[in-house]
Image (cartoon, rainbow, N blue to C red):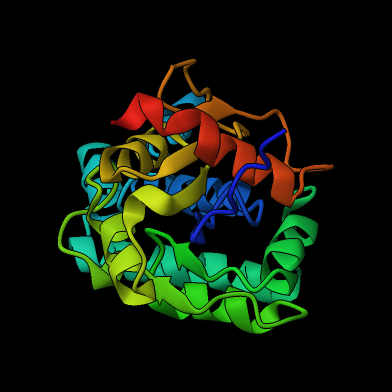
């Protein structure tokens, strides 16, 4: 029996995939909209999961937040970073799988639409050296669902994107990773992810290991060529 080849790198989304920070973003959005006399629902917030922060800020402006885009992004980032500094809610199985990847010597990248300051705060709180590179929202000109961030991560790692596995939790993130050519795993949490032939859906990262990542890479090569 042929053993599937390990991926050349594993590329990780952050919010909702590595850490359960989406409720903190919901808090920030709600506070901003309510400050200007509006209302903000969980369903409205779910639409923004995985989007670029400036794209989300434009939606908040449409709901009455009378602040410049950069000010909205700054305020949200500071709010969420402060909440994460109090306690980081790691997603089930994420640290264990990431540690297994690192122990195997596989390169890793954090690929997030959050600002670099927040991404670096999360990386600094991790109990081991988890990532070789970080690609944040302020490092790219086109946010997810555009594939730029994942292509940039593979470039920085010096590996072909088609030999990478990406792990995502949102529709924009899934589209970004698949569009880049990476074999992609979707782990839905706050947002619903569709079924599809060009990616795999896992209900959780808990109990997953290197062999599962290798199998995803092997299974999805035909779907992406």
Query: Looking at the picture, how far across and down is residue 195, in whole percent?
Result: 49, 15
Front-lying residue, 117 or 205: 205
Determine the image quadrant of residue 197: top left
Identify the residue at the far front of this view. Answer: 1
On screen, residue 168 above or below 113:
above
Q: Measuring 53% from the left and 22% from the top, which residue is drawn there? A: 192
Front-lying residue, 81 or 192: 192
Q: Measuring 65% from the left and 56% from the top, which residue is drawn there? A: 19
Instruction: Give the number of marks.
Output: 0
Q: Is residue 202 left or right of residue 149?
A: right
Query: Looking at the picture, how far across and down is residue 46, in whole percent?
Result: 47, 32
Q: Does the image show residue 3? A: yes
On screen, residue 213 above or below 90:
above
Identify the residue at the far right of this view. Answer: 207
Q: Measuring 37% from the left and 24% from the top, which residue is drawn there? A: 223
On screen, residue 129 above or below 158:
below
Q: Measuring 27% from the left and 38% from the top, which residue is drawn there? A: 179
Query: Looking at the picture, how far across and down is residue 116, in whole percent?
Result: 40, 76
Q: Does the image show residue 88? A: no
Front-lying residue, 34 or 216: 216
Front-lying residue, 26 or 153: 153
Q: Is residue 18 left or right of residue 173?
A: right
Q: Name the quarter where the N terminus is drawn.
A: top right
Query: Looking at the picture, how far across and down is residue 51, in whole percent?
Result: 34, 45
Q: Is residue 48 left or right of residue 119?
A: left
Q: Name the quarter where the C terminus is drawn.
A: top left
């Amino acid at each position: 029996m042929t053993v599937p080849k390990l991926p050349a790198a594993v590329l990780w989304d952050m919010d909702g995939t590595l850490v359960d920070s989406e409720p903190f973003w919901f808090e920030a959005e709600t506070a901003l909209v309510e400050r200007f006399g509006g209302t903000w629902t969980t369903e409205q917030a779910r639409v923004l999961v995985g989007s670029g922060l400036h794209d989300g800020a434009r939606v908040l402006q449409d709901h009455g937040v009378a602040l410049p885009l950069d000010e909205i992004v700054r305020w949200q980032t500071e709010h969420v970073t402060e909440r994460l500094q109090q306690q980081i809610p790691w997603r089930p199985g994420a640290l264990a799988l990431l540690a297994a990847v690192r122990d195997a010597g596989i390169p890793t990248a954090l690929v997030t639409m959050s600002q670099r300051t927040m991404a670096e705060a999360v990386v600094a709180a991790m109990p081991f050296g988890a990532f070789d590179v970080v690609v944040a929202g302020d490092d790219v000109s086109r946010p997810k669902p555009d594939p730029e961030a994942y292509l940039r991560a593979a470039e920085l790692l010096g590996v072909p994107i088609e030999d990478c596995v990406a792990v995502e939790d949102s529709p924009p993130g899934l589209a970004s990773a698949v569009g880049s050519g990476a074999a992609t795993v979707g782990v839905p949490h706050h947002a619903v992810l569709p079924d599809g032939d060009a990616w795999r859906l896992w209900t959780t990262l808990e109990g997953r290991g290197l062999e599962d990542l290798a199998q995803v890479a092997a299974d999805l090569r035909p779907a992406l060529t």
